Image: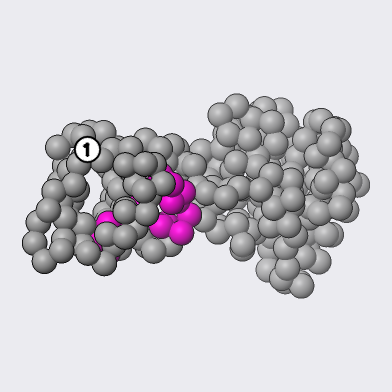
Amino acid sequence: MKSLRALIVDDELPARKKLLMLLKGEPDVEVVAEASNGVDAIAAVEEHRPDVIFLDIQMPGMNGFEVVDALEHKDRTLVVFVTAYDEHAVKAFEVHALDYLLKPFDRTRLRNCLERIRAERRTDTSKLNELLAEFRPREYLNRVVVKTRGRVLLLKIDEVDWIETAANYLELHAGKQSYLLRETLNSLDEKLDPRQFVRVHRSSIVNLDRIQELQSWSHGDFIVLLKDGTKLRMSRRYKQNLADIWGERGL
């Protein structure tokens, strides 16, 4: 079996150093990157595509569960949660998680964890989605990781005014800024709260809170005028989407 590519994520440097030292003693494990926060962790996953992430739970900004939610390739990346807190989460991990490491842990405990990881790779199955569904279910996307000018940013989805297709990307417009996201419009549409975002055209989605008015255009189409003056075409194919939502709001 090929070497196990690992990513270490912990906001505490001593904890990262200890885990790195222990993993270096395993001949089939290669640590491809380290990260001290959630945003950098997501970027490292996209860049290095590790087989497993050793992921701290308690971190400022984004906790471990939020990092997993944001991962685009979580179905192909195994996760071992690392925690210093023996609380309710531990019992959930014992039943559902691939594994967890309770700080402080020793080499023996880590090797037991690695054996589980190796077995998981051989069977090519993962219990991570079961853990997330039971521990903290989420219905709709509330933040998205975007790239701009060589940086990776965490953008709250309610800050987005409207979204349009841009070649192989989506362009997310938020105020005076715009960001590129490598995803299809259909895929993103399924993740957005339909009470907040509505498809108005095959190439665009709009935040309902940004709409100022609708203007009749031609052949049953409309112009959607946003509060910042942006004009978007709404084809009659998607007119019912907006009519249903506005009806719910009593408009």
Tell whether position 191 is magenta.
yes
In the rendered structure, the answer to whether residue 193 lies left or right of residue 58 reads left
Tell whether position 172 is magenta.
no
Q: Position of residue 5 (x, y in %)?
A: 64, 57
| Residue nearest the viewer, comparing 122 with 2 | 122
Q: Position of residue 184 (x, y in %)?
A: 37, 62
Does residue 42 appear in the picture of this structure? yes
Q: Quadrant of the C terminus?
A: top left
In the rendered structure, the answer to whether residue 133 lies left or right of residue 206 reads right
At 30% from the left and 48% from the top, the residue drawn is: 206
Picture quadrant of residue 166 = bottom left
Residue type at the position of mark 1: Gln
Q: Position of residue 241 (x, y in %)?
A: 34, 57
| Residue nearest the viewer, comparing 215 with 43 | 215
At 61% from the left and 63% from the top, the residue drawn is: 76
Q: Position of residue 246 (x, y in %)?
A: 34, 46
Provide the residue designation for mark 1.
Answer: 212
Q: Quadrant of the N terminus?
A: bottom right
| Residue nearest the viewer, comparing 213 with 194 | 213
In this view, which residue lies farthest toward the left?
A: 218
Compared with 112, 118 (above or below) is: below
In the rendered structure, the answer to whether residue 20 lies left or right of residue 190 reads right
Does residue 34 appear in the picture of this structure? no
Question: What stretch of residues is rendered in magenta?
Answer: 188-202
At 76% from the left and 72% from the top, the residue drawn is: 122
> What element does badge 1 sit on?
strand
Compared with 153, 11 (above or below) is: above
| Residue nearest the viewer, comparing 65 with 150 | 65
